Amino acid sequence: MTEAEFIPFARPDITEAEIEAVVETMRNGWLTTGPNAAAFEQEFADFVTGGAGGVHAVAVNSATAGLHLSYEAMGIGPGDEVLVPTWTFTSTAEAVRYLGADPVFVDVDPDTLCIDLVDAEKRLTDRTKVIAPVHFAGLGVPNQALADFAATHGLRIVEDAAHALPTINEGAMIGTHGHDATVYSFYATKTMATGEGGMVLTPHEDVAKRMRTMRLHGIDRDVFDRYSSKKPSWHYDIVAPGYKDNLTDTAAAMGRVQLRRLPEMTARRAAIAARYDEAFADLPLQLPAHAPEGSTHAWHLYVVRLTAEAGLNRDAFIQEMADEGVGTSVHFIPMHLQPYWRDTYQLTPEMYPVASAEFERVVSLPIFSSMTDDQVDRVIAAVRASLD
Ligand SMILES: *Cc1c(COP(=O)(O)O)cnc(C)c1O
């Protein structure tokens, strides 16, 4: 029976502990942002900084919301430009448009598929305010080069760390380098999941305060404060037309358990990636870039690229894998090829030669921490059979 079961490309890793934590929020009656969300913020900041502190954590209901709040807190508005790699999910760019500003897409490094700072430099204008690197698949964008680039050109940094929990980048955990904002996703497929959810870390008190206000209708104090502090509970001030981006306590309760399990889940992903690396070494595949000395890879994704010797194209390979009972995906369809972005900014494949070429041959193989050894073996067998 299990032999015939389809192996999905991704699957959340949920145990009885997460289920009990969620049920407990239902029993205690606090469903929306409350004690669990506050504890989750503290525990998340402690995890990323190793207890050293120095960052403010703001829980939100998605990374998309976190990106929006981050750009908003940086003062991004109409006429401003944000450098975004074309190799990303649309969130990194769409949140710029929410504010009436323009994403400027940048080509990627052929090895890592992360933003190419040489190309980024060519796309700078006097309207460029922010650079939003994506640590693709869970591998960090070279940190010193990024920091130097931003400092040289007077840009703020909003890191899209949706894939990079946890990732050590040049000796320090992503989220602790002092960049203006680091945004995480707890979407169902990510390295830890709350269904929908996200977190923003920032070293700046004023940025954190603005994000806390804007994530909840522009109210100056969040609901939890309102019911636990000494001011009359009915009183609140609206100081801006804010949004509805707060994280529920139900999701936060699940997140707290996932966070405790994250080291174990990360180790499992790394072990699966190591098995794949070994098993695919002799195949006509370009295997994923590895972290350099002093850095680590979170292995949110395991992306292979078919080489010319493979003898079949990416779409045919995906079909063969599906026929073998294995789900795959493609990360990403570059933004410059998507109708809205292409047409709005008159983008052509020639403007992004690396991303346009690499897109044709990338495939994401299943990698998730609840994968069994048997499932890993079946994926390996399916890849070998498909490339025969
Ligand atoms: C998943 C993802 C997002 C969006 O995360 P949500 O929590 O679903 O909003 C943003 N950027 C990248 C690179 C992602 O992969």
Image (spheres, rainbow, N blue to C red):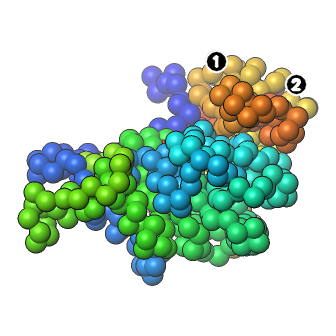
Image quadrant of residue 232? bottom left
Q: Secondary structure at mark 2?
A: loop
* Left or right, 192 with reference to 243: right
Query: Which numbered tag is attached to residue 311?
Result: 2
Percent x, y for residue 189?
49, 41
Q: Nearer the viewer, residue 305 or 377?
A: 305
Where does residue 285 sit, x and y in percent of width and height? 81, 39
Mark 1 or mark 2, which has the lower sequence index?
Answer: 2
- The answer for how far apart the CA atoms under marks 1 and 2 are is 18 Å
Task: Please name the amino acid that badge 1 sits on.
Answer: Asp
Q: Secondary structure at mark 1?
A: helix
Residue at the image point whose x is 45% and y is 47% from the top: 65
For the point 34% across and 69% down, the residue is: 42
What label does residue 50 carry, if any?
none
Q: Is residue 168 found left or right of 232 in the rendered image?
A: right
Residue at (70% x, 56% y) in the render: 128
Q: Is residue 293 visible?
A: no
- Quadrant, the N terminus: top left
Of the residues shown, which amino acid type is indicated by label 2? Gly
> Mark 1 highlights which residue?
323
Residue 386 position (above or below residue 197): above
User: Which residue is more in the foreground, 309 or 118?
Assistant: 118
- Estimate how packed mark 2 is, as few (under 14), some (14 to 19) or many (20 or more) residues with alpha carbons within 10 Å: few
Q: Residue 216 location in percent, x, y?
A: 31, 52
Query: Across the whole image, how many numbered discs are drawn on residues?
Result: 2
